[in-house]
Image (tube, rainbow, N blue to C red):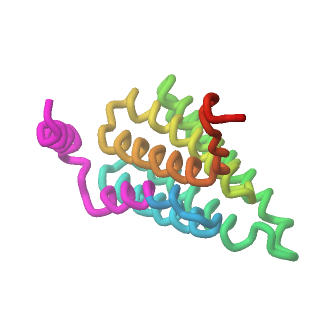
Amino acid sequence: MIAADTVLTWYDLAGTHLDIFGSLGLTLGFIAGLMPRRAWMLGGSAACAACFGAHYLTLGALTGTAMCAISVVQSLVALTCLGAPNRNAWVHPLFAATTLIAAWLTITTWNGTPSACAALGALLATAARLNAAPQTMRLLFLGASLCWAGHNLLVGSVFGLTCDLLTILGLGIALWRALPPRPVTAPGYLQA
């Protein structure tokens, strides 16, 4: 199968799911993982979740919209308040409350393994937003994206799976870029 056939097949499968919000969310999901700073990652993540929330709303997927709203709140709180003096006291209770809401939404909309993947993805993303170290944050977001990819694969969401794969690619590139350079050694026959 050539590349053009692959793109056309993907477009046919994604069909009704393509809209401006979904396209922006897909783009922002990829870009957020590439961001060099924690604040930029959180801003990109909030923008991505807002776009996907609007996308899910246009599809009538209210649980997806609610999960995205929780992601936006958590990302913006982590961006503006985490680590700020005199504001940390309410950040963790807010994250705990939003996590309980996400758990309640998962239970009330339980659909087996896809729901478990979504719940674990949401939990890992929450842990990522609470983390101050960019590389650890990326690793947690990578785990969350893998869980969401499992969810989207199981429910047959080509558009969501494409976004997950691009996000995983972006996070992988950023993690790889941050690895320390490996020392170059000469082959054995050149060493003294």
- Counting labels gives 0
Q: Residue at x 63, y 44 (%)?
A: 184
Give x and y (percent) for residue 137.
66, 52
In the displayed structure image, the side of residue 51 where residue 173 appears, left or right = right
Q: Is residue 78 above or below residue 190?
A: below
Q: Give the residues drawn in magenta, as a range.
A: 1-30
Query: Does residue 162 sit above or below 134 in this rendering?
Result: above
Q: Quadrant of the C terminus?
A: top right
Name the quadrant containing residue 77: bottom right
In-image side of 68 versus 156 (left or right): right
Which residue, as the protein is rendered here, is positioned at the far bottom? 85
Identify the residue at image location x=37%, y=52%. Answer: 56
Residue 20 part of the magenta segment: yes
Quadrant where the N terminus is found in the figure = top left
Q: Quadrant of residue 91?
A: bottom right
| Residue 176, percent from left and from top | 56, 47
**Front position in the image: 112 or 152:** 152
Q: Image point 53% across, 58% down: which residue?
A: 69
Quarter location, residue 119: top right
Residue 63 visible in image: no
- Residue at the far front in the pictured view: 192
Residue 23 visible within the image:
yes
x, y percent for residue 180: 67, 50
Residue at 59% x, 44% y: name it: 122
Say if the magenta span includes residue 36.
Answer: no
Instruction: Decide: is 94 above or below 15.
Output: below
Principal secondary structure, stretch drawn in magenta: helix
- Residue 137, compared with residue 190, is above or below; it is below
Residue 86 placed where, x, y %?
87, 76
Q: Nearer the viewer, residue 186 or 123?
A: 186
